[in-house]
Structures are given as structure tokens and as C-alpha cells.
Image: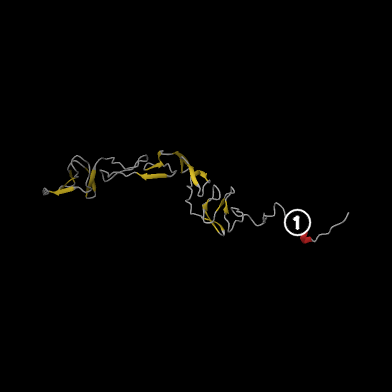
Amino acid sequence: SRNIHLPLEKILLCINRGPTSDVTLSMDPIDEYAYPDYRGKGCMDESGFVFAIGEQFTPGPSTCPCLCTDEGPLCSKPECPKVHPRCIKVDTSQCCPQCKEKKNYCEFRGKIYASLEEFKVSPCEKCRCEPSGEVLCSVAACPQTECVDPEYEPDQCCPICKSGPNCYADTAVIPAGREVKIDECTICYCTYEEGTWQIERQATCSKNECQRS
């Protein structure tokens, strides 16, 4: 037998030739989307389809649209709307994530309320659990009282007139519906609209001639 000695460069040339000679191996970090080097020829998506330069395509099911250029894919990065904070199921199969299911209840002051449920958190404050998961509250609008000395009860929102309709006669409080003699010379009356008890806060007073003693 005869030994054959080949130069190192020829040995490397023989190793590099073969079915894998066209494949370029790279140890560079892989980007978010790894594309074969089709620059100047076209672009390839995740499934292996090649797109011509100038053609728009989507590299994968969850990626944003791209334009095939001479330098490779030029992909758009749109400003996607924010996912609702109460979303419990997100669809990430498209370019922008979309919320598919939100909470059907509300959390408010440590308690859970069903969607569209109405509840009171105080005698004056009424709330509702909206389908969006937010709680909207409103404060009761109390009607104008028919007295000048209304009182508040612990379990009621609006004040009540315990002594009935009344008004001021100077600094004194007099009942409505009848004339009240304040002193020897003054008679006062709480005026109100007929059929209602919408009281004027100050009484209408008239002074008569005082009787001489």
C-alpha cells in the first residue's frame, strides 16, 4: 500500500463539499424571528414559503405584517391597544394581543359583587357593578326639607323634619300653617305654596298697634 499525504487546505475543501455545502452555520444569537439569508432574492416565513421582494407577508401566526426588501423583512411594530386590566383570557395568536374574556364580577372594598348587581355602601351612597368590571357609585340627592331644623337619623341618608314644617320668625322657629304671636305687637306666619310644603325660611310678619296697658 501507498500512503497519500494531502495538504490541509485540500482536506478542508473536501469536508466542506457535499450536500450541506450550501448551508451557512452561524453561532450568532437568534433574533425574535430567524430568517434564512434570502437578501436580494426574497423572504421566507416560518412555514418555508418564499415571498418576492416588494411583497407583503406575515412571517408567522402571531407576528405582525412584514414587507420583503432587498435587505430582508421589514416588519411593522404597531402600537397595540392595552389589554384590559381585568382580562383573564388573552389571545396572542395575532399581531396585537386581544382580550377574549373579562372578569364578570367586581371587587369593591374587599367584597365581591356580580355583574349588574346594585348595592349600597352607606345610607347615601348607591353603587353598581358594571359589565366592564368597574364600580360606579352615586350619592343620593336629598330633596329640600320642609323645615329649618332637620335632623339626621343613623340609618337614613336624608334629614327629616321631626317637628313638622316650620320656618324662622326672626330667631325663633314657628310651625307652619297657622299664625303665631311672637309678642304683643307681632304676628308671624310661615308661607308655603298651596298644596305643597315648600316653606320659605323666613316667616311673613305683621305688626299691629300694641294695646296700651
Residue identified by numbered label 1 = 14
Label 1 element class: helix
Residue 99 in the image, given as x and y percentages of width and height: 49, 45
Figure coloring: secondary structure
Q: Choose top left, top right, bottom left or bottom right for residue 27.
A: bottom right
Q: Residue at x 14, y 48 (%)?
A: 206
Residue 144 in the image, given as x and y percentages of width and height: 27, 45
**Dot 1: few (<14), some (14–19), or many (≥20) neighbours within 10 Å?**
few
Front residue of 122/72: it is 72
Asked if residue 179 is positioned above or below residue 15 in the image, the reply reads above
Residue 85 in the image, given as x and y percentages of width and height: 48, 47
Q: Mark 1 belongs to which amino acid?
A: Cys
Q: Residue at x 16, y 48 (%)?
A: 205
Left or right relative to 188: residue 149: right
Using the rendered image of the protein, determine whether residue 185 is visible from the camera's viewpoint: no
Left or right relative to 211: residue 86: right
Front residue of 13/72: it is 13
The quarter in which the N terminus is drawn is bottom right
Q: Residue at x 74, y 58 (%)?
A: 13
